[in-house]
Image: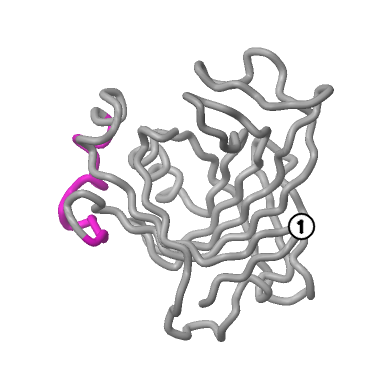
């Protein structure tokens, strides 16, 4: 799948390699050790330094959002805002390949933030389509996730969030127009793409 970028959305293929536990913070190293995901049989990456591979596609829809209240952000993270507003939005991801197999992910982006001189976005809530992926988010990234009923409809024309997560107990999420996130037929060999290498210490 070729990379496609347009405004007000970003479409691209994603290949992410997660780093081995020695590069993670002490607490996360403890989470990675002693978990089934850390076993060699479940490492699907390219080498020992980046043993876990996540391959798929994503859609980012930016939006102007209210800046998070004081105390909502993790320690050391500062919201970048103007008159109480910041840049958030939605990220929808479809993983064809991961340490726990294919799954869908939906992230509510809460603000544009700064940490240690770098700028990024803060994901206020992360939803995944099955319990295995929910556990992997904690084991690999050290990030809490919520299992939800997520559906990416191929039809529907332009990409659109038809049903955002509203219920905390049993969230349901629907995105239409997902075929627009593909620049080739389903199952076609990947060509090009956006490789992303990162480690949990960047969070």
Q: Measuring 47% from the left and 63% from the top, which residue is drawn there?
A: 194
Residue 111 part of the magenta segment: no
Which quadrant of the view contains residue 199?
top left
Q: Looking at this view, is 128 or 2 the one in front? A: 2
Q: Is residue 200 left or right of residue 183?
A: left
Residue 33 part of the magenta segment: yes
Q: Compared with residue 97, is residue 185 higher up or lower down, i.e. above or below?
A: below
Locate the C terminus and report the quarter of the image it occupies.
Answer: top left
Magenta extent: 31-46
Seen as rendered, the residue at the extreme right is 83
Q: Measuring 50% from the left and 18% from the top, which residue is drawn there?
A: 76
- Tell me if mark 1 has few (under 14), some (14-19) or many (20+) residues whose alpha carbon lies within 10 angstroms of its own: few
Q: Compared with residue 45, is residue 171 higher up or lower down, i.e. above or below?
A: above
Which quadrant of the view contains residue 177?
bottom right
Q: Looking at this view, is 14 or 107 the one in front? A: 14
State the image coordinates of residue 59 (x, y, percent, origin top left): 63, 59
Q: Measuring 68% from the left and 74% from the top, which residue is drawn there?
A: 180
Q: Secondary structure at mark 1?
A: loop
Give the labeled residue for mark 1.
Answer: 8
Q: Measuring 57% from the left and 65% from the top, which residue is drawn there?
A: 12
State the image coordinates of residue 148 (x, y, percent, origin top left): 59, 48
State the image coordinates of residue 142 (x, y, percent, origin top left): 39, 34
């Amino acid at each position: 799948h070729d990379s496609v970028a347009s405004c007000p959305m970003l479409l691209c293929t994603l290949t992410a390699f997660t780093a081995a536990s020695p590069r993670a913070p002490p607490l996360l190293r403890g989470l990675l050790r002693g978990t089934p995901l850390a076993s060699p049989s479940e490492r699907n990456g390219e080498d020992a330094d980046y043993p876990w591979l996540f391959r798929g596609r994503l859609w980012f829809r930016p939006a102007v959002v209210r800046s998070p209240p004081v105390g909502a952000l993790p320690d050391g993270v500062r919201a970048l805002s103007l008159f109480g507003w910041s840049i958030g939005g939605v990220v929808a991801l479809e993983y064809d390949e991961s340490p726990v197999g294919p799954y869908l992910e939906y992230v509510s982006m809460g603000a544009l933030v700064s940490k240690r001189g770098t700028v990024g976005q803060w994901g206020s809530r992360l939803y995944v389509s099955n319990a295995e992926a929910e556990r992997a988010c904690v084991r690999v990234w050290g990030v809490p996730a919520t299992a939800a009923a997520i559906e990416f409809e191929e039809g529907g024309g332009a990409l659109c969030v038809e049903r955002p997560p509203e219920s905390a107990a049993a969230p349901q999420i629907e995105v239409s127009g997902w075929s627009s996130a593909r620049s080739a037929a389903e199952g076609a060999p990947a060509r090009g793409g956006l490789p992303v290498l990162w480690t949990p210490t960047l969070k």
